[in-house]
Image (tube, grey):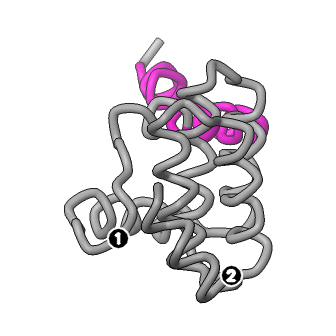
């Protein structure tokens, strides 16, 4: 954390430094501090999924599933499903950016997606098969 503090002193508004500092704080169990840094990044950057992924992961690590759900819903409101999927593929294997854990984030995102689909009253594959079955 020493280097992140020095970097933040030099560039307090640099989103990459804030993002990485937030992720480091989360991994150290400093969840409230991490959330504060990550929320600042999310607020000051547009079109970047990484802070939202990090907020979801931080919330899960903190045991705050309500917050994880809130950030996941916010992500779906701001980004399209293909962008979210592409982001997982891009960022999970990219070690030049803040690390993220698909194992932690994807279950929350999947649950949110299924709930949103249900809210749209979109028929599931089981319903479609039922409709196509001759009587």
Residue found at x 65% / y 40%: 117
What residue is shown with label 2?
12
Tag 2: Cα neighbours inside 10 Å, few (<14), some, or many (≥20)? few
The answer to which of marks 1 and 2 sits earlier in the sequence is 2
| Alpha carbon distance from label 1 to label 2 | 18 Å
Q: Is residue 3 above or below residue 11?
A: above
> 35 or 66, which lies in front?
35
Residue 54: horizontal and vertical position, in percent? 54, 52
Q: How many marks?
A: 2
What residue is shown with label 1?
97
Membership of 118 in magenta stretch: yes
Residue 26: horizontal and vertical position, in percent? 54, 41
Residue 70: horizontal and vertical position, in percent? 78, 40
Residue 111: horizontal and vertical position, in percent? 57, 30
Tag 1: Cα neighbours inside 10 Å, few (<14), some, or many (≥20)? few
* Drawn side of residue 98 relative to residue 67, left or right: left
The disc at residue 23 is: none
Q: Residue 76: in sight, yes or no?
A: yes
Residue found at x 53% / y 60%: 21
- The magenta segment is 109-133
Residue found at x 67% / y 59%: 38
Q: Is residue 96 above or below residue 58?
A: below
């Amino acid at each position: 954390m020493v280097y992140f503090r020095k970097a933040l002193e030099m560039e307090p508004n640099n989103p990459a430094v804030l993002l990485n500092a937030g992720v480091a704080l989360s991994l150290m169990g400093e969840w409230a501090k991490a959330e504060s840094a990550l929320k600042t990044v999310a607020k000051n950057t547009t079109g970047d999924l990484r802070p939202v992924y990090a907020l979801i992961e931080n919330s899960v690590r903190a045991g705050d599933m309500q917050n994880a759900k809130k950030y996941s819903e916010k992500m779906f409101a701001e980004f399209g499903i293909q962008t979210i999927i592409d982001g997982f593929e891009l960022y999970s294997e990219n070690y030049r950016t803040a690390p993220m854990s698909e194992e932690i984030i994807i279950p929350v995102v999947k649950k949110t997606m299924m709930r949103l689909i249900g809210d749209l009253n979109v028929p599931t594959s089981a319903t479609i098969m039922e409709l196509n079955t001759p009587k």
